Every structure is written in structure tokens, then in C-alpha cells.
Image (spheres, coloured by chain):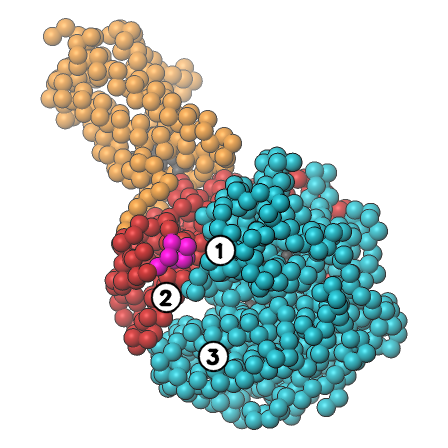
Amino acid sequence: MNRIKQFYGTAVGKKFVVALSGIMMAGFLVMHMIGNLKAFAGEEKLDHYAAYLRDIGQDMFGHETVLWLARIGLLVAVLAHIITIVLLVKQNHKARPVKYHIQKSFAATFPARMMRVSGLLLLIFIVVHLAQFTFGSWLSTPFEEGKVYSNISQAFGAGWLAWFYIFMMFIVCLHLYHGLWSFFQTFGIDNPDRNKPLRALAIVVSLVLFIGFSSVPFAFATGMIGVAK
Amino acid sequence: MELNSKIPNVPIQEAWRTHLDSINLVGPKNRPKYDIIVVGSGLAGASAAASLGAMGYNVKLFCFQDSPRRAHSIAAQGGINASKNYRNDGDSTWRLFYDTQKGGDFRGREANVYRLAETSTEIIDQCVSQGVPLAREYGGNLANRSFGGVLVERTFYARGQTGQQLLLGAYQALEEQVAKGKVKQYPRTEMHDIVKIDGRCRGIVVRDLMTGEIQTHAADAVVLATGGYANVYHRSTNAVNCNVTAAWRAHKQGSVFANPCFVQIHPTCIPVHGDHQSKLTLMSESLRNDGRIWVPRKKGDSRKPAHIPEDERFYYLEERYPSFGNLVPRDVASRAAKKVCDDGYGLGETGFGVYLDFRDAIAKQGKAAIEAKYGNLFDMYKDITDDDPYETPFKIYPAPHYTMGGLWVDYNLMTNVQGLYAIGEANFSDHGANRLGASSLMQCLADGYFILPQTIGDYLRDIYQQKIDEDHPEFEKHADAVSAKIDSLMNIQGTRTPLSFQKELGEIMWQYCGMSRNATDLKKALELIPKLRKEFWSDVKVAGTKDSLNQSLERAGRVADFLEFAELMCKDALERDESCGCHLREEHIHEDGEAKRNDEKFSHVAAWEWMGEDADHQLHAEKLSHEALKPTTRSYK
Amino acid sequence: MNFTLSIWRQSPGVPGKMVEYKVSDISAETSLLETLDMLNEELTLKGEEPVAFDSDCREGICGACSLVVDGRAHGPGKLTTSCQIFMRSFTDGQTIHLEPYRSAALPVVKDLVVDRTAFDRIIQSGGFISAHSGPKPEPNSMPIGYDELEESMDAAACIGCAACVAACPNGSAMLFTAAKIGHLGLLPQGQPERDQRAREMVAKMDEEGFGACTNYAECQDACPKGVSIKFIGRMNKDFAKAMLCAEDDRRGSMDVN
Ligand SMILES: Cc1cc2nc3c(=O)[nH]c(=O)nc-3n(C[C@H](O)[C@H](O)[C@H](O)COP(=O)(O)OP(=O)(O)OC[C@H]3O[C@@H](n4cnc5c(N)ncnc54)[C@H](O)[C@@H]3O)c2cc1C
Ligand code: HEM
Ligand code: FES
């Protein structure tokens, strides 16, 4: 325990926590996206899938237990990610108190420089998103527990919300592009020989997530799918 | 005064062992009772301080850079010699000894040179175990490259950064001792004087370069590892801050200065382009393996080099030295370049430059092969000059590079002042009148890792009972004198900057005491230097204040010492009325233009004693023994 | 060529500011530091304080020179040091901004001079192989593969100039520290102390007040010797292994005299 405390006490240790929690969240996002795409299979399939999630492992542990464990795991990752980032940002501000008169960057990519901003937007988004679709508050449209398809359909039918979601998915994509590559770098998997393929992988994964996630609100908003009004 | 070199009276092959077995040692329990000061953190100083600290002594280390790792040794490119005989080409301790003595034109001390050759292999072992990444072959064994003036391959290297890697090895060993509390380091601190009490060196006076504070430090022994003085020429291949101050101030306290006129001029440097240039960059000697050196046959030929046809090119080294050609030793190549330029064939506006041309090598071996061998050097040249040597020849000219002269030391590396040691380039050491490539790094590390740590006990045992600390009145006296000197520099407030004096002195030295010398010129220099010195002390203008970081004041102090030292150099050059190694007296050349030694009269170390501000230096000649190796005439025809 | 130099001037105890100076008749092949030399000559004669800046070898190897030129550590171009910047890389008449490194761990001492002793202390915390002078084994009894050796040399090439810290928006010293851990950790000689080296150097870096890594790679871009950030990844791995998997550190119980 002492060693773990010492480990977390260093900047490098914290980096590992950020990367690990980040990759956990990214993994979750991939599953989440695949789940969302069920929307294209129709109302029944999606609602069934949502119910299935609650039933995983129920024969062994009981209803919703596994889902809650996953949620707690995810929550821990989110908290670890955010708390650690706050600590690191503080350390970094202290390490560079005076700015240059001429501020330029030469190597840092735009997404990299935007990590803090994109991360913050993501935090706001996560809160809004949970409030809307998990707890059902803040929705101008009717919310009915368990009726996933119709809930989303009505919400995205409102148009602007869909575009807000699509924009947020772009932010996810931005954050993950640097985040994923960073994960490889932090874990010492990256090196100049592998840099190009790993960067490409980061682009591909974040784009797939963007397209996958955005397609659902897009389809609902444009009326390609959805419950009849 | 009697100079006793303390060389054991046995054949040189047995001298070092015999000596070690007969001197005093300090036991491990007693070592922490001794304080040793090391000034200088180059290869010599860092390795000595690290070794002494690890043995248990309390060490204080001083350097003027912001970190010991930046000492000038960091700049050495080519390599370090050791007679490992890895190439199976007949190398041996004897052969390295022979090459070094012959290269030095038989003006080195036989026993010292033999010891250096003996120690060389241990240095490589030591450095490798410290993690110095010396180059390896594909099979994993250490690699070698060849260097000028010898017939075997014995040079070890780490890319073009050998000095850097060796110094980092020594620096890391040093920092380990700092962490253990055995060494305390004082960066950005300049030594201004040594303190002598009862004829023994008992400490130093330093100036903290950040605060201007004058401090004193007492010790049982003081080691100077303060490098060479090639910057007496202002522009040299040395780092811009290298200087003679520490050695000179020790000299003025009684330490005799040996062979000050022996300065090596390196043939392949980037020429001067303008008055404001601050230093000359060395291009590795290895370029001469494939490059051809020439000048246009027509004086002032302003055509592009590529447009000058073959028969109008004067390949002067190949013509004059058919068997060695472009690969003659450094001093010979340098003088030949000077000669063609003095005769009016030099390149460009300044007329000081010759071509080093890879056209033929590229045509024969292909660009790729040349790039593989010399790519980094070509790039470096292009960065500096904006010329692409793949397209147009290098322009090169000789530049001051290394100083064989230095403080006189005995076989223990102690100067004639009891308790004051000099190691590395700062002593007059082992290179005679000319140093072979890759031998300085070897000597610095031999001194620092192996010789000094073993010999210093002999003296320390001797002064066991006589502790002295900074409260002794002599410390205050010396500190006051140092302050007074700084005050007088600050107070002149004349009309010329310290740099302008350094430049003018450099020009005098380059012109009258440079690559070739004669009595008339030297006498002329001996008139000009005191005049310039007088002007300096009445007209220099030092900016800023003395109690904070003041680089103008630092330079002024160094120039003041160069102005005194330069005179001794010229005196020594005038006194040595022979040609030997890099010291060419125009009065003494063979018909074919080669140097003519006079072994009968000058087979000695010229050691000069300071007799006071107004008195002349006194010369002490230490006769050199040639029992092991009889001097022959060097010929590279 | 003529230039305006806008230079950070700061004396101990007084807040600093940018001050403009004109320099004229500079030839294109003059170096930036020589231009500063010339300015200093003028200032000295005018009775003003010359600009303090660090330099020594002036050939890109000692790591003393340390300017931030127009917002770039060391100045325009890649794989270069401040002393290897020549005036031909600027346009005639241009204003050139010269600032010191900015990092809490490398405080400004005066004008363009900073205190880099934190780097020495990082090395002291473990950047060495303990091998005190004396007879050592024959090097060829421990062959080292060409590639390993060269990779180690890639890291060892670091000149300790601290441009990585200056360029990093977080003032992080990861590249410097990682280069030393990489250099020694890639060699067989470096193995016995590998764990403790990683543990202690990483901890020291934080203690000295350097920032964390955000994988911007600005350090690698500014590094005059092209040290790769792959060494940072390598250091991270070494560190994690040393912290989480390695045996106990027993040095405390050893009898050191
Ligand atoms: C460009 C170049 C390339 C070279 N290449 C090679 C090569 O390939 N092979 C080879 O064998 N040799 C080479 N040499 C020569 C060799 O590098 C030097 O002779 C050698 O490094 C000198 O080391 P040193 O320890 O004696 O002194 P330096 O490394 O010069 O160190 C002097 C130290 O003394 C300190 N100091 C000086 N005065 C004071 C003072 N007053 N107060 C406090 N501190 C002071 C300095 O701070 C510094 O730490 C080369 C030299 C040059 C210039
Ligand atoms: C909730 C708010 C979030 C904030 C404030 C945030 C902030 C940040 C910041 C500032 C970094 C850069 C850290 C550094 O390199 O020092 C980062 C890295 C990362 N983030 Fe986030 N993030 C958030 C959410 C997410 C989410 C939802 C995911 C996953 C989908 C994610 C995945 C990652 C990854 C993989 C990294 C890279 C880790 C590394 O540096 O190796 N983040 N985050
Ligand atoms: S002055 Fe040495 S690297 Fe620039």
C-alpha cells in the first residue's frame, strides 16, 4: 500500500492513473457505441438490449448487480481521471509560473493543447447526459424508465439536442485522439518506428467512435429512424 | 631552487610499480581527516575528485561553469587512445610509449610517458564499467578507429562525442560522491589565488561569480585541473571561457611554469570570417583520410573551386610529402597551410584558408559512402558556414588548439610548491613538444582516476599533524589582495573593453608567436605585450558592479593574466633556440623546410620561476633522459 | 543587416522587463551570441550593464547556452543550440525577442542566465553507475550488441541544456531524466542499480518542482541532440516496475563507511 501511495505521489505514477482510467473509459465508450448502434435495428432490439444489460449475470448475482458493478468501476475511473488531472494541472501551473512574451508551440498538436478544455466539456456532457437518459431529469420530452428507444427518439427529435450531442461526440473524438496515442506513449509502447501506426490507430478509433456515436442522434434528428410522432 | 622529478632510478618499465611500492599511503580510517580541494571539473578534475571522494577524503570541487558537466573536455570529438591491441596489429605499451615520445619530438619525460601508456588500458575498463557507451562492433566488442601519426588502430570513441561521454562518466561518478556527502561542489566559482603557509599550499581564494563574494577555503592539498591556455590567442578551438588564470596565479605564488611556448595548432578548423567571431570550430582530423587539400595555383583566383581545372590546382601536401600526403602530422599540415597562405595563395578576402576537397572521394566511393563516414561533420560545417561540402570544398585553416606547456610537476604530479598538484592539460605533462590525437583524454583520465589518487597519500601522510583552517591570517591577507585587484580593475573606467584587449593580444601572439617563430618577431612581441599591458591597466573599462554576476569583470581578470602570461610564452619561445614538434623556429629548419632539433642544447624541460613583478623570470632546465628511446629525426616524407 | 533585439533584463531583487536595443551592420554569418557580444561591447562603452547570458563551447556540445529566441527554446531550426544560430536565419530589420528559460525549478539569476543546479541534483539522486576507480573487468568479456549500444548512446547524447524544460508548457524535466535512465538502463552495467535509479530520479524530479508530462512532445522538438520521447515511455515502465514489482530496497541496511 505504501508503495502504491508513493507511486501515486509522483507525476509519473499519476500519469499512469490518468492513462489507465482514460483507457477504461475509452473501452466503455466502444461498448456503449456498439450498444447505441442497436438503435438502427429497431425499437424492440434496442429495448431488449437495454434490458439485457440489467440482466447480465443475474442468475449468479441477482438483477442489475453486474451493471452496478460496471457503473461503480466506471465512476471510479471517472473520478480517478478527474482528480488526478486536477492534481497534475496544479503541479504544472506551479512548475511554469511565468509565461513567455512570445508564446508559440512547435510540436504539440491542436487536440493535445485542447485536452483540458475538451476534458472539461466532456465532464459537463457526462453530467447532462446521465441526467437526461439515466435519471430522466432535464428532458423536455417525456421519460419512461426502460423505454430507451422512445426516450431517445423523442429527445433527439427536438433537433438542437441531437446537434449538441454530435458536437460533443466531436469533442470526445478530439480528446481521444490525443488520449489514445498518449496512452501508448505513457505506457512506453510508442517509439519512433511505431509512432505512425499508433497515431493512425488513435485517429481511426476516435473517428469510428465519432461516426458511430453521431450516427444515432443524426438518424433520429433527420427522421431516418424513430417512433412515429 | 632544485627541481626534483622524483622518478625512481630503475628502468622505465618498472618505474611506476617500484614507485607505488615505496611511497606512503593514508589508511581508510584516516582519509576522512583530510580535506582536498580540486579546482576544475574537466576530465582530469572530475575524475580525480570522484576517485578521492570514493576513497574517503573530503573533497571540495570548484569550476566556473554552472555545472561541472560543462567543462571544456566535453568538446573533444575524436577519441581516446589505449594500447589494448584489440585489432591484433602489434600494439603494446611500448608502442604507445614510442609513438607518444616520437610524436612529442622527444621532449617528453620518458618515465611519465611510459606510465601513461601502461595506464591507458585500465582507463577503458574503468570507463566502460561506469557506463560510458564507447562504440561497439556488430559482435558486441569494442570498436576502434585510426588517428594520425601512428601505425596501429587504438583509438576508442563514442560517435563524435568521445569527450562528452567520458566527461559525463566522470561527472556522474562525481555526483555520486556529492550525494554521499564526500564531495561538495562549487559551480560558478572562480579561483583567484592559492594560499601558501610555511611553504605549503594550504588553500585557495575564490570569487563566487553569482554574488561577487570573495571566499577562502582551507585544505591539506590543492589540485589544479584547470585546463589549457590556447585562448591567449583569443580565438582558438577552446571554449570561450578557457583561461590561464588559475595556473598563472599559482605560478606567481612560486609554482614553476614549464614549456609555455609549446602550443599545438590544429590544421583543420573553419577559418576566421570576421572580426567579431568568438571562436574557431574544429573539423575532425579524420577528414584528411579522404579529403584532398589544395589551393589555386594562380594567386587571387576568384573562380568557383569547381571551375578551376585540375592542372591549376596546387595539392601542396601531396607534392611535398609524397608518402604521407594529406595525412602528415598536425604540426606539419598546419605549417604547410600557413606557408601557402603567406606566399599569397590563400583563399577568399582574408587570404587565410585552403580547400579540403571531397570531389574525388565522392566520385570514387560515391556520395553515400562519404555520407556514412563523415555525414555529421558535413552537416556541422553546413550549419555553420551555409556552404554544402558535398558540392563545394571545405575551407579550412589552422587554429590554436592544445597547450603542451603547463605547471611543472614531479612524478607524483605535485608542483614544486608542496601540497599543490596539477593534472590534465594544466600540467606540462607527457606530450613533449607536440601531442598526438586522442592522447589528451587519455592523459587527463590517467592523472585523475589512477595516478593522483595513489600518489597524493605520500604527501598527506607527511602533514598529518598540521591542521590549519580559514582563520589563519594568511587567508585574510590573500583575500584582501584579491579584492584589491578586483577593485583596481573596476576603478580604472577607461575607454576600452576587456575583449578589445584580448583581441589585440591574440593578434600579437598569432602573428609573432604563432605557427612559426623567429627571434625578430619574438623580440617584437616582447616589446608590444608590456605596452599593451600598461595600456590595459590604465584604460580598460569594466562595466557593471563587482557584487553580482559580471561577465565583463570575469573577462577582465582573465585578460589581465593572459597579458602577463603571453610575455613568458614569448620569452620561452625565444629562449628555445631550436625547432621541435610544434615549435618551429625559422632559424632552424632543414633545407627541405623541416624542423631541426638541437638535442645537445635543448633536450630539457624549460621551467620558469616567477621572481616578482619587476624581476625577470628565472629559467630552470630539467634535463630529459633518453635511456629507453634514442631521439631520431622525425620524417614524414 | 540590422536588427532590433528585445531582451529580458533582470537584476537580482528587481523585477525584470523586456528592453529594446538596436544593432546594425551585422554580417549574415555572425552568430546570435556574437551579435550579443557586439551589443555588450557597445553597452560597456556607454557605461551600461552588458546583457548576461551563458555560453562556453560555442559549438553546440557543452549545453551552457540557453536562450529562448522568439518563443522557441534555443532558436529557429531543429537540432540546434543558441550558439549555433546565425543571423542569416533572421530577416533584415526584424525584431528578435530573447528571453530566459521559464521554469520554477530553473529560476532566472540575471537577464538571460538561469540556475540549472536542479539538473545536477537529479543526477545526484541516482544518475550514475557506482564503479569506483580501480581495476575493472575486461570490457569485451561483456559484449554489448551494436543496436543496444547505439540506442543507449542516443539517450546519452543529452547535453543537459534544459531546453526540454524551457520548451515544455508544463516545465517538465521528463526528457532529461528519462535520457539518463535510458542511457544507463539499456546497458548491462546499469542493471544492478536500475530499479532504485528509476525510483529516486523520478521522485527527485517532482521534488525539484518540475511539471508533469502531457505528451506534447515539445521537448523532443526543441532537443538539440534529438533525444526521443520514447525514452520517457521507457522511464515510465522502469519506474512502474521498480515501484510496484521490484524487491525491497535494502541499501539502508548496508554498511557504508
Ligand atoms: C575541439 C577540441 C577537440 C578535442 N578533441 C580531442 C580528442 O579527440 N582526443 C583527445 O585526446 N583530446 C582532444 N582535445 C583535447 C582535450 O579535450 C583537452 O585537452 C582536455 O579535455 C583537457 O581537460 P582538462 O580536464 O585538463 O581541462 P578542461 O576540461 O579544460 O577543464 C578545465 C576546468 O577547470 C575549471 N577552471 C579553469 N580555471 C578555473 C578557475 N580559475 N577557477 C575555477 N575553475 C577553473 C573549468 O571550470 C573547468 O571545469 C580536444 C580539444 C578541443 C578544443
Ligand atoms: C470527465 C472529464 C475529463 C477530463 C477533465 C479529462 C481531462 C484529461 C486531460 C487534461 C488529459 C491529459 C492528461 C495528461 O496527459 O496529463 C486526459 C487524458 C486522457 N483522457 Fe481524459 N478527461 C476527461 C474524460 C475522459 C473520457 C470520458 C475519456 C475516455 C473516453 C478520457 C480518456 C482519456 C485518455 C485515454 C487520456 C490519455 C491518458 C494519457 O495521457 O496517457 N478522458 N484527460
Ligand atoms: S555554448 Fe556550448 S552548447 Fe552553446
Real-space Cα separation, disc 3 to disc 1, in angstroms: 36 Å
| Amino acid type of the residue that numbered disc 2 sits on in the rendered structure | Met
Q: Colour of chain A?
A: orange
Real-space Cα separation, disc 2 to disc 1, in angstroms: 24 Å
Q: Quadrant of ligand 1?
A: bottom right
| Residue carrying label 3 | B557
Q: Disc 2 vs disc 1: which is toward the camera? A: 1
Same chain check for tags 3 and 1? yes
Would residue A67 appear left or right of A123 to someone viewing this image?
Answer: right
| Amino acid type of the residue that numbered disc 3 sits on in the rendered structure | Gly
The magenta region covers C26-32
Disc 3 CB within 8 Å of nearest ligand 1 atom: no
Which image quadrant: the C terminus of chain A? top left
Please identify the dominant SS of the magenta region: loop
Using the rendered image of the protein, determine whether residue B409 is visible from the camera's viewpoint.
no
Spot occupied by residue C108 in the image (x, y as percentages of width and height): 36, 63
| Residue carrying label 1 | B348
For marks 3 and 1, the one nearer the N-term is 1
Q: Residue at 69% across / 75% down in the picture?
A: B587
Q: Residue at 59% across / 70% down in the picture?
A: B514
Q: Are marks 2 and 3 in contact (CB under 8 Å)?
A: no
| Residue carrying label 2 | C38
* Residue C38, image quadrant: bottom left
